[in-house]
Image (tube, grey):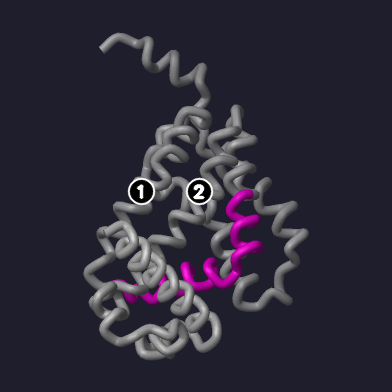
Amino acid sequence: MTFNRNAGAARREALLDAALACFEAQGLVRTGIEDIRKTAGANPSSVYHLFKGLPELIAALLERTFVRRYTAVSAKVLAARTARSAVVALVEAHLAWVFSHPAEARFMYQALTLDLVGDYREGLRATKEQLKADIDTHLTKLLATRSTAAPEMVDVVLLGITHQACRTWLLAPQYLDKKWMKKMLPELAWQTARALMQPLGRRSKRSAKPG
């Protein structure tokens, strides 16, 4: 049974790797599950034994990408001990992941934009929230702002400009310099965070007022 489980996991990973290679080579919307099967050298029965169809396969690849991305980012952010260093670490770690894994990053951005996962959307959202829960909690504590706990804080507020810059770089790298991105984007995120931070002294005075 252990051998069978391991063999099944290996076939699943091979199909996900093949899917990523196909998406990178011919585009997400132009790739069919048969292209992926042939690239992986898999039998049709084994493909449909593991995945009901292309949406489930895309969702599985997105989930794997989320795990890899947040694993790379989380360690850097959680090691930070100040608000500024945490925000800078968040952006720097995300950029490092994108620059090191452009195919996965390109797939992630395209899949999220095109919304090709169908009924697996909510499950992916729940997985993503679980993966970044520690990051959210840590930033909430360090930034001491009422807005930090919102699910959109990390990806929309702190990483919004960085996400857009990464999309541009992945699509047309000649328009954005990596050195500029590494230098400017962490500072821009920190300036955004500072604008949202609630001064601790003011918060303490309000909380001290009766009723």
Give residue 29's quadrant in the image.
bottom left
Image height of 197 relative to 150, above or below: above
Quadrant assignment for the N terminus? bottom left
Residue type at mark 1: give it. Answer: Glu
Looking at the picture, tell me which residue is in the foreground, 174 or 22.
22
User: Within the magenta stretch, is there residue 195?
Assistant: no
Q: Earlier in the sequence, mark 2 or mark 1?
A: 2
State the SS at label 1. Answer: helix
**Residue displayed at 61% across by 29% down:** 82
**Residue displayed at 49% across by 83% down:** 22
Looking at the picture, tell me which residue is in the foreground, 110 or 55.
55
Range shown magenta: 93-117
Looking at the picture, tell me which residue is in the foreground, 19 or 27.
19
Looking at the picture, tell me which residue is in the foreground, 27 or 48.
48
Where does residue 55 sit, x and y in percent of width and height? 30, 76
* Main secondary-structure element of the magenta-colored stretch: helix
Residue type at mark 2: give it. Answer: Thr
Residue 129 is labelled as 1
Where does residue 98 sit, x and y in percent of width and height? 60, 62
Residue 71 is labelled as 2
Where does residue 32 sit, x and y in percent of width and height? 37, 88
Q: Give the Cα separation between the discs numbered 2 and 1.
A: 13 Å
Image height of 128 relative to 65, above or below: above
